[in-house]
């Protein structure tokens, strides 16, 4: 490995050489603004072995030399930290892990062509599709720690799951053919990693946020609601930035509508901090502008599982102002709830189908000894 590099320049190539040096300097400057991975040099490493093992191109080694101010590319002191811009790293296949599955959840596995029932712990790869039935939900975690809650009657395809070298940074591109997902995205800065959910009607791209996206094939309409951060929502060659507290929708082939303010959280009635029997009672006041409500039960870590997800219409009497408090009786799918901390949440749905901000009732469930779960098949009931 006693490689020597000799530069020969003639008057005709001097300009080319100088422009090459300038390009390397500009590349190093641009790289300094993107996310970086620190590689700890091991005995025997040199810039060529590091480039071969980790970079998308071996001939990136001069860039690595310029960025890190390395005097001798053939000799790197063990323990030295090499700065490597994330976009220079090789893309490796990554996997998504199923955290939970409630009800009828299946996965279409691309490699085998088989459809299999889904349990927690199943690993999904590029090309695989996750399918939830009615009254069924699932949660997924990606390489970088980002998570999604997949709601009932949904179809979610893993279009691209890849990681940047051995880092936890990832490119995650998933496609929602139908249904709804709620995402909690690990913050992204600089160039490189991206998280994108596409639908047949619109595509959302984000950097660090919490938002929901839905696709309704019957009306060929995609909807998004942003709870934290911002989302670039693209449809029909037009991109709209949707900020926190706003939502929009797009029909297939058309530009998204201008974002509008989401409904506020419904006001909750007083409820006990400890619940000892199912169903869970959730009292709330009618919300002006809501044509329907979505009620859910999630664990204290809300992106671990979705234990109940149901939509219910607003009552006719609400619109006449006669109802003071509505009480929902909520039973999780499967009617079993281990002791622990939970959140019942409810949000209004407006006349455009956009779902508003959640009101949250936090409670501890501690079943009375010897109590049988309720056999009531209905998931919710107005009392």
Image (cartoon, rainbow, N blue to C red):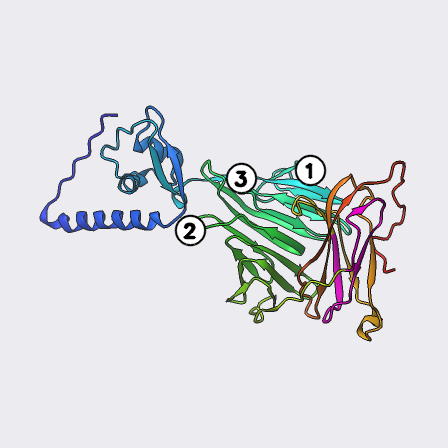
Please provide percent x and percent y for residue 337. 79, 42
* Left or right of 89, for residue 282: right
Q: Residues within 10 Å of mark 3 (few under 14, many from 20)?
A: many
Q: For the residue carrying disc 2, how many other residues have a C-alpha within 10 Å: few (<14), some (14-19), or many (20+)? A: some
Residue 295, disc: none
* Residue drawn at the location 62% of the way across and 61% of the way down: 225
Query: Depth-wise, is mark 2 or mark 1 nearer the camera?
Result: 2
C-alpha separation, residue under disc 3 versus residue under disc 1: 18 Å
From the top left corner, tell me how far across and down residue 171 is, in percent.
Answer: 50, 46
Judge from the rendering whether residue 10 lies leftward or rightward of residue 302; answer left or right: left
Q: Which residue is mark 1?
A: 120
Sequence order check, earlier mark of 2 and 1:
1
Residue at 79% of width from left, 67% of height from top?
314
Q: CA distance from mark 2 to mark 1?
A: 33 Å
Judge whether residue 301 is colored magenta.
Answer: no
- Sequence order check: which comes first, mark 3 or mark 2? 3
At mark 3, the secondary structure is loop
Q: Residue 233 versus residue 259: which sits nearer the camera?
A: 259
For marks 3 and 1 on the same chain, the one whose residue lies earlier in the sequence:
3
* Mark nearer the viewer, 3 or 2: 2
Q: Which residue is mark 3?
A: 94
Is 303 left, or right, of 167 in this rendering? right
Within 10 Å of disc 1 (Cα), the crowding (few <14, some 14-19, many 20+) is some
Q: Which residues are magenta?
A: 269-296
Element marked by disc 2: loop
C-beta proximity under 8 Å, tags 2 and 1: no
Q: Quadrant of residue 380?
A: bottom right
Q: Assign the C terminus to one quadrant of the image.
A: bottom right
Q: Position of residue 269 (x, y in %)?
A: 78, 60
What percent of the width, then of the height, locates residue 173? 54, 50
- Residue 190: numbered disc: 2
């Amino acid at each position: 490995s006693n490689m020597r590099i000799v530069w020969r320049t003639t008057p005709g190539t001097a300009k080319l050489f100088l422009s090459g040096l300038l390009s390397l300097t500009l590349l190093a400057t641009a790289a300094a603004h993107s996310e970086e991975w620190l590689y700890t040099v091991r005995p025997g490493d040199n810039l060529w072995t590091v480039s071969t093992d980790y970079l998308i191109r071996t001939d990136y080694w001069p860039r690595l030399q310029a960025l890190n101010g390395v005097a001798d590319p053939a000799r790197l002191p063990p323990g030295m930290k090499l700065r490597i811009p994330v976009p220079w790293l090789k893309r490796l296949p990554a996997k998504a892990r199923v955290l939970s599955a409630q009800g009828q959840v299946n996965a279409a596995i691309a490699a085998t062509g088989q459809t299999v029932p889904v349990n927690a712990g199943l690993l999904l790869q590029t090309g695989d599709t996750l399918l939830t039935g009615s009254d069924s939900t699932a949660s997924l975690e990606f390489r970088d720690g980002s998570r999604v809650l997949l709601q009932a009657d949904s179809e979610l395809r893993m279009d691209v799951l890849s990681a940047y070298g051995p880092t936890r940074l990832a490119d995650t591109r998933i496609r929602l053919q139908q249904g709804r997902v709620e995402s909690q995205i690990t913050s992204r800065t600089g160039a490189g990693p991206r998280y994108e959910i596409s639908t047949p009607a619109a595509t959302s791209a984000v950097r660090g946020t919490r938002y929901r996206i839905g696709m309704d094939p019957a009306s060929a309409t995609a909807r998004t609601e942003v709870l934290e951060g911002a989302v670039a929502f693209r449809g029909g060659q037009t991109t709209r930035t949707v900020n926190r507290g706003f939502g929009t929708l797009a029909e297939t082939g058309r530009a998204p509508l201008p974002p509008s303010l989401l409904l506020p959280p419904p006001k909750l009635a007083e409820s006990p901090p400890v619940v000892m029997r199912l169903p869970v009672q959730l009292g709330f006041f009618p919300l002006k502008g809501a044509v329907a409500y979505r009620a859910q039960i999630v664990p204290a870590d809300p992106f671990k599982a979705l234990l109940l997800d149901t939509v219910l219409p607003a009552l006719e009497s609400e619109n006449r102002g006669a109802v003071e408090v509505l009480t929902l009786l909520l039973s999780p799918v499967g009617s079993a709830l281990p002791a622990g901390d939970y959140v019942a949440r409810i949000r209004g749905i407006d006349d455009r189908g956009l779902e508003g901000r959640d009101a949250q009732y936090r409670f501890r469930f501690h079943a009375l000894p010897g109590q049988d779960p309720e056999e009531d098949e209905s998931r919710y009931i107005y009392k």
